Amino acid sequence: MLAASGRPGRSITGALLTEAALIGGAAGVLGALVAWPLTGVLGVAFDPVRAALAIPVAVVLTVLASLAAALSAGRLTPVAALAPAVLGGRRALLRVGGPVRLGLVTIGRRPGRLAAGVAGVALGVGSLFFLLVLSQLFQGAVVGTLLGDAIAVQVRTPDLVAGVLLAVLGLIAVGVILFLGLTEDAPSYASLTASGWRPGMLAAAVVTQALVIAVLGGLVGIAVALVPIGVRTGGLPADWWGLALAILAGTCGAGVLVALLPALGLQRLPVAQLLSGE
């Protein structure tokens, strides 16, 4: 609509980047404020200079993360933006025959979001698994690297808390992806509801999407974490696999919990309104 009314593309891109900067600034301020009491709980000295520096860093990171989308929106023509979405005539790789298949097809239609969700979960799971291995199997310290014995790695409680927070952020990303998909696919879900699909079946499709992201992200994160540790120790002890399976199971369970909220939202779909709009 903005492009059709004469707004230039650079103005649209600038507006989106400004919105991203405001979000990043608000997140940086909130993070700095939360860090103050959190450092007291963990017994770490609070550094106001570092907390203040975290705010512009949050702004820069948020703007960089939004840059590709903002540039794409600025290049979008009014005709392409206002045209109704039409699926291509390619043959489907997997036919929709039930809730599980519906979830697989839905998450596979947006590979970019799937990759983003997997990357977020992998970052959190990999970091947490790496820290737990160092903490439990190496008594919290590893001395010596491939570069020599001059570097020592110690795992402290704040490090484990940071790993947990990364995992939580990855799960939040999964929830955001599911909510976006639910919003965009609401007419399709309404059509399925009108054709006889029960709310539980639609909820199972949403949970399936969360499980796909959680399983793939967990496997990637654990695999990436195993590489440096395996190179350092020259092998993969059996205890690692038990810990890896426990973390993977926990990731899947957390993914299901994250999916419950958007899945419950399917029960409140305005079916008649969505179908009349279509």
Image: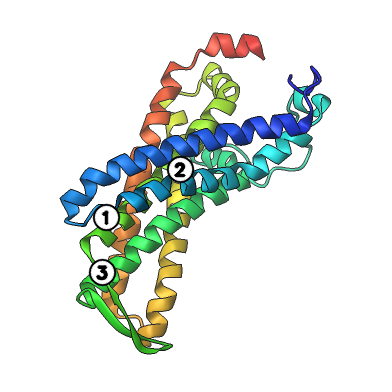
Query: In the rendered structure, which amino acid carries the disc numbered 2?
Result: Ala
For this orientation, the residue located farthest to the bottom is: 148
Q: Nearer the viewer, mark 1 or mark 2?
A: 1
Q: Is residue 45 above or below residue 276?
A: below
Residue 173: mark: 2
Query: In the rendered structure, which amino acid carries the disc numbered 3?
Result: Val
Query: In the rendered structure, which amino acid carries the disc numbered 1?
Result: Val
Q: Position of residue 41 (x, y in %)?
A: 16, 49
Decide which of tag 3 and tag 2 comes sooner along the chain.
3
Residue 3: mark: none
Give the CA separation, mark 3 to mark 1. Answer: 11 Å
Q: Quadrant of the N terminus?
A: top right
- Let me know if residue 117 appears in the view: yes
Say which element carries label 2.
helix
Decide which of tag 3 and tag 1 comes sooner along the chain.
3
Mark 3 crowd level (few <14, some 14–19, many ≥20, 10 Å Cα):
some
The image's colour scheme reads rainbow
Is 238 in front, or is 33? Answer: 33
Give the CA separation, mark 3 to mark 2. Answer: 26 Å
Q: State the residue position of label 1.
A: 161
> Which residue is at 51% across, 43% downward?
59
Q: Position of residue 149 (x, y in %)?
A: 34, 89
Decide which of tag 1 and tag 2 comes sooner along the chain.
1
Q: Position of residue 58 (x, y in %)?
A: 47, 46
Q: Is residue 251 left or right of residue 277?
A: left
Say which element carries label 1.
helix
Residue 155: mark: 3
For this orientation, the residue located farthest to the front is: 49
> Which residue is at 46% across, 38% downward?
25
Q: Is residue 67 above or below residue 142?
A: above
